[in-house]
């Protein structure tokens, strides 16, 4: 009888069991989003500002208001939304339902009040129907992009280390970023642009607190898009510095008061 220990096939099978083949290592590299989230957010901010500013120049060159910004805005919106959906980050970046019931959020009445200020002193059609439609598309895209970039990407990235710092930086950069309107020639005056920076910081503050408390950006996006879109119908003939200051103070007071109310929700359960 042959000794199985002398059988070459036996040795090969034994070696195969004792020395299994090493598994191939994954070639997937950590993404910039996961390794350097703050840098990732800043790159998105830079891309948004540069591309939308260039698109504004294209609109002026074509002689059709909002044509370039509408197209670029929709492309960036589609890219960012697709990326979030592909990586299943809807919950992380607030593209999900609120964790807090509407009645505990006062049915978002303060946000509705913020949207009305552009129509306080009359409304009018400031451009052709086509340009107005393009403007609404552009403003809605800006509302989505700015909320997801400043409140989603930037706030979430900094929040990991320091919550208060994340709130301050997200609000301040959002407001100060509106100085781009002055550089692009979109601001009506220096005063109006400085007022815009001030109330944008306040609105950014209430939006980021709302996001932090509810886990959702949906209401922020809708309100932001509403404020932007209704600004297209504001009547410039009835606007005065005093009225601009009054409206700005209203925006700041309501935003800060609502943010203070939302902040107190942390001491009680989120769900009713």
Image: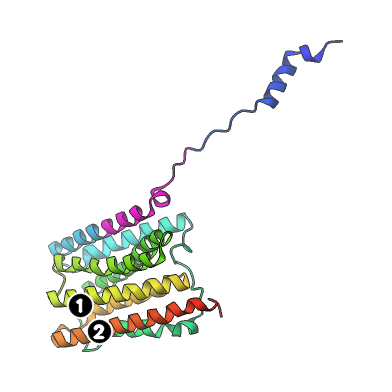
Placement of 149 over or under 32, stated as above or below = below
Q: Which residue position is annotated with label 2?
A: 249
- The magenta-colored residue range is 27-48
Say the numbered circle drawn on residue 127.
none
Residue 28 falls within the magenta-colored stretch? yes
Q: Which residue position is annotated with label 1?
A: 195
Relative to the observer, which residue lies in front, 239 or 136? 239
Residue 225 seen in the current view = no
Under tag 2, what secondary structure?
helix
Residue 49's quadrant in the figure? bottom left
Which numbered disc, 1 or 2, marks the residue that appears first in the sequence? 1
Placement of 39 over or under 212, stated as above or below = above
Residue 209 seen in the current view = yes
Badge 2 crowding class, 10 Å Cα cut-off, few under 14, some 14 to 19, many 20 or more, is some
How many numbered markers are drawn? 2
Q: How is the image coloured?
A: rainbow
Q: Residue 32 appears at what percent x and percent y?
A: 38, 48
């Amino acid at each position: 009888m042959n000794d199985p220990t002398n059988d070459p096939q036996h040795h090969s099978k034994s070696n195969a069991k004792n020395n299994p083949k090493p598994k191939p290592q994954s070639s997937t590299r950590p993404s910039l989003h996961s390794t350097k989230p703050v840098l990732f957010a800043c790159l998105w901010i830079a891309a948004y500002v540069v591309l939308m500013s260039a698109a504004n120049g294209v609109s002026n060159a074509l002689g059709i208001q909002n044509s370039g910004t509408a197209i670029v805005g929709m492309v960036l919106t589609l890219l960012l939304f697709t990326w979030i959906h592909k990586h299943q980050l809807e919950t992380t970046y607030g593209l999900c339902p609120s964790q807090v019931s509407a009645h505990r959020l006062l049915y978002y009445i303060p946000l509705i009040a913020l949207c009305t200020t552009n129509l306080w002193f009359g409304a009018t059609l400031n451009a052709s129907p086509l340009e107005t439609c393009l403007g609404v598309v552009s403003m809605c895209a800006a509302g989505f992009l700015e909320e997801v970039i400043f409140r989603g990407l930037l706030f979430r990235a900094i929040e990991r280390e320091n919550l208060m710092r994340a709130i301050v930086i997200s609000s301040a950069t959002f407001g100060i970023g509106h100085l781009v309107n002055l550089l692009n020639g979109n601001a009506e005056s220096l005063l109006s642009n400085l007022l815009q920076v001030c109330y944008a910081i306040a609105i950014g503050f209430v939006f980021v607190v709302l996001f932090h408390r509810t886990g959702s950006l949906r209401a922020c996006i809708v309100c932001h898009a509403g404020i932007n879109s209704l600004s297209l119908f504001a009547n410039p003939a009835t606007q005065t510095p005093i009225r601009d200051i009054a409206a700005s103070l209203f925006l700041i007071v309501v935003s800060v008061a609502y943010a203070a109310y939302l902040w107190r929700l942390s001491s009680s359960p989120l769900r009713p």
